[in-house]
Amino acid sequence: EDKVVQSPLSLVVHEGDTVTLNCSYEVTNFRSLLWYKQEKKAPTFLFMLTSSGIEKKSGRLSSILDKKELFSILNITATQTGDSAVYLCAVGLDYGGSQGNLIFGKGTKLSVKP
Amino acid sequence: NAGVTQTPKFQVLKTGQSMTLQCAQDMNHEYMSWYRQDPGMGLRLIHYSVGAGITDQGEVPNGYNVSRSTTEDFPLRLLSAAPSQTSVYFCASSYSRGDEFPYEQYFGPGTRLTVT
């Protein structure tokens, strides 16, 4: 059974801290790994990773994929209260008509205190 | 562009009632999908479509029907609502980028459904 596991499930930090969110997966026919941010509404896209070892960066957020060890991390440096959200990891599969389907983890709830 | 729109935003049903959740996108995306999100469960795929006239089941399809008569619209029908279908429902769509099809999904604002 395909599965995506995120850790920790919740995390409380103070502004300025650096956090690392983890996502591991066990799927057949891996194609890509995606990160989304969800703030009480629809998830918004952050990154899509398809190759190992290539860091994707956007401002204070960065992510990297390890296809050998089957995991990804999402780093947030100098956290701000606006980073408080649930961060979702999803894996895209690569077979037949299911190419578009995503398997989501349960999410990591990040709370950033002032 | 309006992106992905969903109606209604909130709905309360009694057990056994039926209804249709509407989803539309104006980005000419080929791929559309429906997810439900329950507390602590992440997003689970209900049904998806890779183009007009083509639909298939996801992880949790029981109790739901879909159709895709046009590229723009992908309604989700609850046949006989049950309390277990109380959830937040998200519609998503995605475009084709050749080898990267179709993973960067755009989500609608969601419909919060309560079944009593």
Image (spheres, coloured by chain):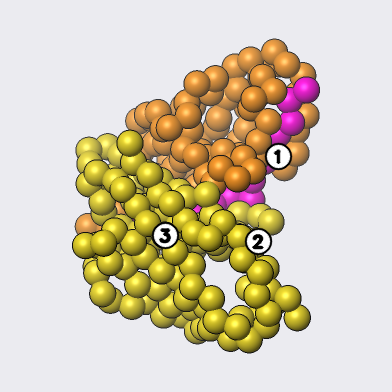
Chain colours: A yellow, B orange
Quarter of the image for residue B17 reads top right
How packed is label 3: few (under 14 Cα within 10 Å), some, or many (20 or more)?
A: many
Mark 2 vs 3, N-terminal side = 3
Q: CA distance from mark 2 to mark 3?
A: 19 Å
How packed is label 1: few (under 14 Cα within 10 Å), some, or many (20 or more)?
A: some
Q: Eyeballing the image, is B112 above or below B80?
A: below
Q: Position of residue A39 (x, y in %)?
A: 65, 61
Local SS, label 2: loop
Mark 2 or 3: in front is 3
Q: Eyeballing the image, is B96 above or below A75?
A: above
Are tags 1 and 3 found on a single chain? no
Local SS, label 3: strand
The residue tagged 2 is A39
Q: CA distance from mark 1 to mark 3?
A: 27 Å
The residue tagged 1 is B112
Q: Eyeballing the image, is A75 above or below A94?
A: below
Relative placement, left or right, of A56 versus B35 is: left
Residue at the image point whose x is 60% and y is 83% from the top:
A17
Relative placement, left or right, of A113 versus B57 is: right
Q: Chain of mark 1?
A: B
The magenta stretch spans residue A103: no
The residue tagged 3 is A23
Residue at the image point whose x is 29% and y is 46% from the top:
A27
